[in-house]
Image (tube, grey):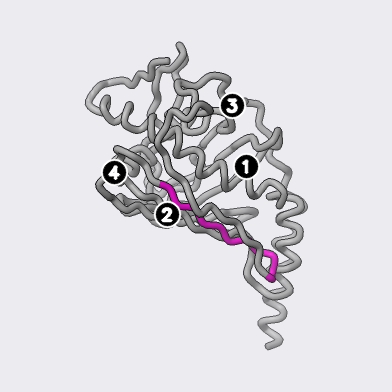
Amino acid sequence: MQYIFKASAYLLVLLLAGLWLKPPAYFQQAPLQKSPWNLEQGETDVVTHNVNLRQHENGQYNFTGNLLLSNISPKMLHWFYKNQIHQTLLFNSQTMPWFRLTNPNTMVNLAIVSSADKLSNEIGYGTVFDEQTLLKDTQWQTRYKVRSFGDEGMTLDILHAGYTVGSIEYKYRKNKLGTEVNISGTIGLNMPIVGQISNFYLFKKVYPSDLLDDWISNIVSSYKHMELLIPALYDQRHKSSYLIKT
């Protein structure tokens, strides 16, 4: 019992030190000002439902979301995620990585931090990467580690200060219309006392709790763009370069 208490106290000290001493995200690049599709006018068939965010007694949050992608197979979805950082396209007279069009209004950057295969710049099992987005004029940076990755879906651990502080699981299921995507995740530590204290600082300093709804909505809304983007890219997969027309 004494060992567990000491270990928990040590973990708490390290985590809080990481939360307080790690500088906040800062990036100069901005989201795109123009995109190929005017999604505000409903030019997509993506159906979303059951998007839900709940806080539990130790301060951690659980969230779920479900959506349907028309005319996209799980294989196409996996293909896109694997290549979204290192593959480029030409749009609006600019060459850019694919991910910049997944959510042009908020997406700023994706960058691989480390990879299990040092000779590859694709996303795969064991890859650690940073995602930078802009939520309500607030810079939001999330570090992920790929725990599983395939045509059936993927699982991403959320990292901060060297610790796993959450995870997101994406499950793909093919149907006659396309692919159903089920999203479930948690962020924060599910531990008495230590978790409560750590989560208080986590959602004050690192991931502001008032932006969590926007973060989850941003994850789901990115699929509205991907429903149009992925087929356009997949049709060009045998070509030497990719082009998206305005």
Label 2 close to label 3 by CB (< 8 Å):
no
Label 2 secondary element: strand
- Give the labeled residue for mark 2: 182
Q: Secondary structure at mark 4?
A: loop
Say whether residue 163 is visible.
no
Q: Mark 3 or 1, which is nearer the eye?
A: 3
The vertical placement of 39 against 221, above or below, is: above
Expressed as whole percent of the image width and height from the top left, the position of residue 148 reads 39, 56
Q: Residue at x 66, y 31 (%)?
A: 27
Q: Which quadrant would the N terminus be assigned to in this image?
A: bottom right
Amino acid on which the number 2 mark rests in the picture: Asn
Q: Which residues are magenta?
A: 57-67
Instruction: Name the residue beneath numbered marker 1.
Output: 141
Q: Amino acid at mark 4?
A: Leu
Q: Which residue is mark 4?
A: 177
The stretch drawn in magenta includes residue 61: yes
Q: Is residue 80 above or below residue 164?
A: above
Q: Secondary structure at mark 1?
A: strand
Q: Are marks 1 and 2 in contact (CB under 8 Å)?
A: no
Task: Report the Cα–Cα distance between label 4 and label 2.
Answer: 15 Å
The quarter of the picture where the C terminus appears is top left
Q: Earlier in the sequence, mark 3 or mark 1?
A: 3
Q: CA distance from mark 2 to mark 3?
A: 27 Å
Give the residue displayed 45% in from the left and 39% down from the top.
Answer: 223
* Foreground disc of the pair 3, 4: 4
